[in-house]
Amino acid sequence: MNTNKLNLTLRIWRQKNANTPGKFVDYKVSVSPDSSFLEMLDDINNELESKNQDPIAFESDCREGICGTCGLVIQGHPHGPIPRIATCQLHMRNFKDGETIYVEPFRAKAFPIIKDLMVDRSAFDKIQQAGGYISINTGSAPDGNAIPIPKEVASEAMDAATCIGCGACVAACKNASAMLFVSAKVSQFALLPQGQSERYERVQRMVKVMDELGFGSCSNTYACEAECPKGISIKNIARMNRDYIVAKIAKEEVV
Amino acid sequence: MSWFTRALNSSIGKKFVMALTGICLILFLIIHLINNLTLFAGPELFNTVVKNLDNIKPLVRVIEIILVIIFVLHIFNGVKLWWENKQARPQSYAVNASSENSTLFSRTMIYSGSIIFIFLVVHLRTMWIAFNFNPEVHHNHTYYEYVSAAFRDPVYSIAYIIAMILLGFHLNHGFQSAFQTFGWNNKKYFPVIQKIGFFYSWITAILFALIPIYFLSGGGL
């Protein structure tokens, strides 16, 4: 246990709803280095509520980095300055005493602010609903190793499937592009035998909905990969581009 | 809209057009550079090369028209993408950590591109128009003399050198970015593509920039 508390100034974005302009509000806190970032926000909220003030709205669920619900932009980094973790896994020991920490919501036209640090990410659900599934009948569970899949392929598909859909890629991208997310969801099926029959229709449907929802295009800055808490590779974006181009040139489905 | 125009207007379609036209321009620059390097061999070779190009003018004109189409598509799509991408984030961040997660080259394509565009307009006005329509230069085949005189103007030369540095910036990101857009990202050869892109862009930029430096420092007199 570290008993030396950190004195920090938190500059937190407060915004009543999507239609009112927001502003930064400063909160002075004295916090244990062992506290997680979200525990610190919980403490602030307890104090605000005890004073009958409006608590800071932010999202969280599992608090172990697997659900993708939490997501704050801390010091300009989605999920904070430490790579490969979600906001809930960020601890205050990573900050210096006396530091001023900016806490902002994900900013994107496709992710409108609901309140304070909470954004509406249902755009991701809409993309998933457009094709992020397998609709053919795959039958009951096959015998082990009945469908041979090389280890490398299975691992690559699994790596794509570790995307938790948190939206950090959109938040990090200078164009608020969702291509890393969409490409991970496309790739996890495109790599496996079960995903083949709908492969080219899927990529076209998902990209179409992504474009309609107001996400930007990819500039290949690779900021998404650097900020992704799961380290999803931009090779997935290349795969999505390839499948999309092949689909448009060689396939007959008109999506 | 037909499936074709819809495909080209999709996010990936627009990127594909950028990548394809970009690769065409990269190939064009190699030919342009080889032509220009004959300047170092003196007036005779350079003037002969340009004169020979003049002899196959109809073919050159066709290539010029194709080039204009490629340039227009690249510039139009680039500006369109920049504008649309700006709309995707109406409110910017108070703290921006982009320098820690991406390269400067990749974030400034619109700026390096815009300056190269200004350069292109000036370049066409000074060089292309003189080569084609200036009676003194065109009829007497004194291209070398015209170029060397132009580059002895320090303002023109320094602006040219700055434009070439920005061209290096632009190509450094553009080269590997085009391959990523085509989907040709494979762990076997993508690192090689990135290296080729790096060397191609800076060698091209430096060799082009050497021309004004050569004349500015009294070469070719």
Image: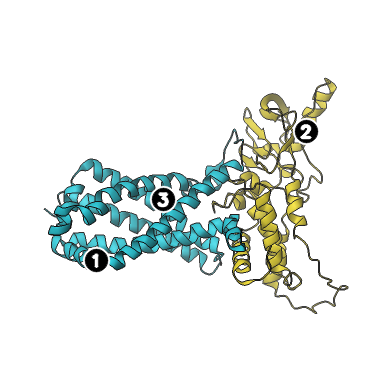
**Residue that label 1 marks:** B53
- How many neighbours does mark 2 have within 10 angstroms: few (below 14), some (14-19), or many (20 or more)? some
Q: Chain of mark 2?
A: A
How far from the left and from the top, in percent, is residue B41?
17, 63
Measured in 3D between alpha carbons, the distance from the residue under mark 2 to the one under mark 3, in whole angstroms, is 42 Å
Is residue B127 toward the left or the right of residue A237 in the image? Answer: left
Q: Are marks 2 and 3 in contact (CB under 8 Å)?
A: no
Letter of the chain in yellow = A
Is residue A125 toward the left or the right of residue B191 in the image? Answer: right
Numbered disc 2: secondary structure: loop
Query: Looking at the image, which residue sits at the far top?
Result: A51
Numbered disc 1: secondary structure: helix
**Residue that label 3 marks:** B169
> Drawn colour of chain B?
cyan
| Quarter of the image with the N terminus of chain B in it | bottom right
Query: Looking at the image, which residue sits at the far front?
Result: B1
Query: Could you tell me which residue is drawn at 78 percent across and 62 percent down?
Result: A133
Q: Chain of mark 3?
A: B
Label 2 or label 1, whichever lies nearer to me, is 1
**Residue that label 2 marks:** A57
- The reply to whether residue A39 is in sight is yes
